[in-house]
Image (spheres, rainbow, N blue to C red):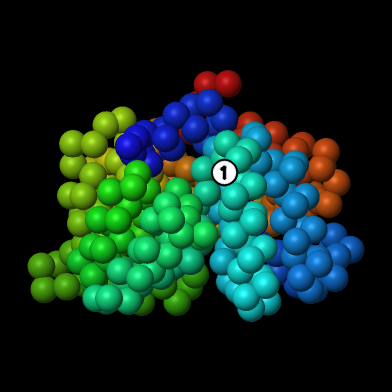
Amino acid sequence: MESFGTRLYRAMAERGPLCVGIDPHPALLARWGLPDDLTGLARFSEIVVDALGDRLAVCKPQSAFFERFGAQGVAVLESTIRQLRDSGALVLLDVKRGDIGSTVSAYASAYLEPSSPLYVDAITASPYLGVGALAPMFDTAAAHGGGVFVLALTSNPEGSSVQHARGADGRTVAQTVIDEISQLNAGAQPLGSFGLVVGATVGDTGHDLSRVGGPLLAPGLGAQGGTAADLRTVFGRDLSAVLPSYSREVLNAGPDAAGLRAAVDRVLADCRAALGSGS
């Protein structure tokens, strides 16, 4: 089976280096003139998929905004995932799961096994019970051509107290996470399947990302304050593996499909210019 890293590398080359979140929070539903209920949730998701699914490399539904409606909301999420996959977009489900033993194995089965109704190309994961505790996710992803993006350096102000703390060997927690994911990707070509989440607004943190060998998801662009130009400050000179991620900056242009597409074209042009990607 073709690896997630290979599929992502090709998708970014063909469709451009861009991920767009699907975040149907109450304020956005209201902005679109939609009710904050299952009907609004389904309509919002349908509009986003129809407008953008066939032009994005990666779509990133935020699971929590579907889960808040219970089982029926999860059913909308399942349908949205299927529609996105049918459109040719890779689906990165933002769930930030992290646990140990049989529980993390169950999460791996829920999202990374093809038999699951929630099966996606990749998920986000939290490493703060230890990167090694996520091994069932890594193993399941590798077995089925999936990917895992592990939190490393996040933009929220509370994150630095944990991520910048230093261990006995002098490395920060974040650098330890970075180094362990780098080992998982060793030798992978053209891109490893295990990535990191590094906020676009964290600035120059002094961490070494040069040997990751996998994708670097950069959320926080647009409405959260980050700009495409900030990517060079965060990631340095080699930006080939950076996957910029926007949500509200694009979604605020809805519900008009043409407006959503125009917003994607605009931010993608900004990303191409910042990353040095060709057209």
Q: Is residue 30 left or right of residue 11?
A: right
Q: What x and y, as percent, mark residue 29?
A: 79, 65
Q: Quadrant of residue 138?
A: bottom left
Quarter that holds the C terminus: top right
Quadrant of the rendered structure where residue 237 is?
top left
Q: Quadrant of the N terminus?
A: top left
Indicate the position of residue 61 as horizontal and vertical percent values.
59, 58
Q: Residue at x 79, y 74 (%)?
A: 37
Residue 113: tell me if it is visible: yes
Residue positioned 51% across, 60% down in the render: 118
* Residue highlighted by disc 1: 85
247 left or right of 99? right
Is residue 115 rendered to the left or right of residue 246? left
The percent coordinates of residue 72 (x first, y second) are 67, 72
**Residue 233 horizontal/vertical position (percent):** 43, 46
- Residue drawn at point x = 23 percent, y = 44 percent: 185
**What residue lies at 18% left-to-right and 49% top-to-bottom?**
183
